[in-house]
Amino acid sequence: MKHTILQLTFLLSWFSTFGQEVPTPNNDIFVNNEVSINSNHLEFSPTFLEDGILFISTNPVNKRFKVKDTRIDKNIMSIFRSTRDEEGKLQAPVPFAIELLSTVHEGPLTFDRTAENMFFTRNNLKGKKQIKGKDGIVKLQIYSAQRMDNVWKNVEKLSFNDKNSNAAHPSISVENNELYFSSDRPGGQGGMDLWVSIKSGDTWGEPINLGPKVNTEGDDVFPFIHADGTLYFSSKEAGKEADLDLFTVKKVNGEWGIPENMGAPFNSGKDDFGIIIDRDKRNGYFSSNRGGGIGGDDIYSFYALNGLEKNVEEVPDFEKIITINVKDEATGAIIEEAIVTYMKLDELTLGRAITGISNSNGEERDPNDLVLKLPIDENAKTGLTDFNGQIPLRLNRGSYVVKVEKSGMQSKQIALNSQSDILEYSIVLSKYDPTLANTGNGNNNGNGNNNGSGNSDGSNNGNGTGSGNNNSNGNGTSGEAFGEEGVVTTIQEGTVIELPNIYYNFNDAAIRPDAQTDLNSLADFLIQYPATEIELISHTDSRGNDRYNNRLSQRRAENAVDFLIKKGVDRNRMVPLGYGESQLRNTCNDFNNCSEEDHQFNRRTEVKITKMDAPITVKFINNLPSYISEAPTSTKYTGRNKTNISPSNPSTTEIDLNEGNDEYDPEGNYKVIAGVFANMDNAEKRLIEVRALGFNNADILKLGGSDLFHVVVSRYRSSSSATNTVRKLKSQNVRAFVKS
């Protein structure tokens, strides 16, 4: 696909390396072609707007707008809109804002935070007359429009437009005071450059070139300025026969740094451009004409499992070293190379607790005694015990969960507090007994030895030893304690549960597919406790006016309630409340400058328990017994994340970062398990869910002589292929692990 510089999209075969190496593919980022909105025409340059996206397409709106541009041999470009359905999926597109349509190109656009003001690209018009530049070509210009009574009015060209130069692809900052765009106006580095106009009062200032670090002698186009100040754009170096690549750049001490190529899967060797990214940097969309698409340019969505920017692990200010001793219960012998996984629980909220609810094990229990498992996730650290059966854990201030595993033995897990007097924990492992699988609550606490200066269990035994981690929570966290059963807390009237995994796109109240886990678990909780009534509360940060924030937060709360209703929860038990910016948790108000992270702290979804028949005691217990069928491949302790260990270990999410062959192999030794159930009905429900995701070979089996029902998603010859499938399932909110 080749285009001329006169085309609205400026989709030349551009490329720029800026001297940077192209990163390797990221296996934690999933890219999907949005087939519901793409066609055999060009679809490109998406932007967020209220419960969906807008984008540009050469698909004719109707016969009136079936106008061919002979320079590019395509129909004129118009703006289309796609909203999300109740499951968060994009629906078939429709034309956007008929009042804005013309018989020239309409192009990439952006909205301010309130979504009441729009900036868009259009060929230069005066009334209905096209205005040509000195070279006889109608240039692109940036226009503004205002939404009044749901109609876009007051369409005007911005004052800095030049009829002899192109100006296109606007993107406005979250504070509404900086407008980034592409232009070939005089004073640039060459070709199309990136510029910014700064607003003063009601006036947009003279554009400023972003300079030679960002701009090249080629073409630099399609800017997107993220709320945290990161700039994304596409570029092609002058004179190179290559294609558009996506780049990212940040300011360092007020100056733009060196752009970095975003690499695969965003860049493909074809044109990749027009990216937009949500506030949490987990989801977004971009355009590409890569192979396997539907039309010339298609729109792709992406989901970053761990976010686009993984924080560089800082060496913490260690408070204390806790030693774990592992022994054989039967012989008392030390156990070398036991796998020890540990994770800090400072962010353990009741929201995370609710996501652990499971009724599939058929246990009988007090209806007001809610038993949950402590989560071990991808943030955990892993190491191996040494030749003395020991491993030192360098812990910062706070609460931790520690899990110990060894080939052929039952795993054990304890919760501990680094601020207690206990400096050593002895954990004994017993031989694996398949008859005990998925039974019991796993009170796997060993003996914790303190430094002799206090009584870790509250009793004076004279030798400074205490049992397990039966100490109260020393950091003053209200309503949470550590006992033999692990962590104990209470849900009662007035309890506020924060749902940390509810994400919304900018100016968007629709619940995204990746953000439904917490709500699904909340639905399970409300169905399990039918006398419970709640308020579902949504908050925004302070940016934007009060009216807009109140309206947006109310829509978000109502959408969450509607989601729960579809899951079988009675509407009369739920009240949606949007508080806008009225309940900020820090000083990030209209008068203080704050980081995006500080603003994000105020954007949240909460559940307040307003009525229940009795308080519910929540016990976070040890994981149920599990089994490792082979020895770990790592031979020494390391404190780094994601140590390479046995592929059969279900407590880690990464086993082999090399790409594998994802082809199903019925003889493969590596099985992907998406749940183990005592009840066949529950297993069949999970099987239906897995097959709906395209795993047609999934089946229910009893493995290892167990009477439990295993949902086997697929089989592979390599552990890397199995791990890739686990990642894919996780992106669809299906928990899975690898068993060999």
Image (cartoon, rainbow, N blue to C red):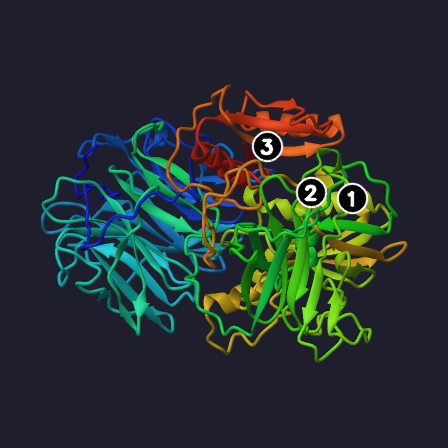
Q: Nearer the viewer, residue 44 or 503?
A: 503
| Quarter occupied by residue 562 | top right
Percent of width and height locating residue 195: 24, 61
Q: CA distance from mark 2 to mark 3?
A: 16 Å
The reply to whether dot 2 and dot 1 touch (C-beta < 8 Å) is yes
Q: Which residue is rendered at x = 50% and y = 51% of the image? A: 505
- Is 59 above or below relative to 262? above
Percent of width and height locating residue 548: 56, 61
The reply to whether dot 2 and dot 3 touch (C-beta < 8 Å) is no
The label on residue 440 is 1
- Is 199 above or below relative to 643? below
Earlier-in-chain disc, 2 versus 3:
2
Q: Nearer the viewer, residue 356 or 290?
A: 356
Q: Secondary structure at mark 1?
A: loop
Of badges 2 and 3, nearer the viewer stands: 2
Residue highlighted by disc 3: 673
Three-letter code for the amino acid on which mark 3 is drawn: Ile
Q: CA distance from mark 1 to mark 3?
A: 21 Å
Q: Name the side, left or right, on which 25 lies relative to 373.
A: left
Q: CA distance from mark 2 to mark 1?
A: 9 Å
Q: Which residue is rendered at x = 32% and y = 63% of the image? A: 250
Q: Secondary structure at mark 2?
A: loop
**Can you say which quadrant of the picture contains the N terminus?**
top left
Which residue sits furthest right?
613
Count neighbours of disc 1 (C-alpha within 10 A) and say few if under 14, some if 14 to 19, many if 20 or more. few
Residue highlighted by disc 2: 625
Percent of width and height locating residue 678: 75, 31
Does residue 97 appear in the picture of this structure? no
Three-letter code for the amino acid on which mark 2 is drawn: Pro
Q: Which residue is rendered at x = 60% and y = 61% of the image? A: 324
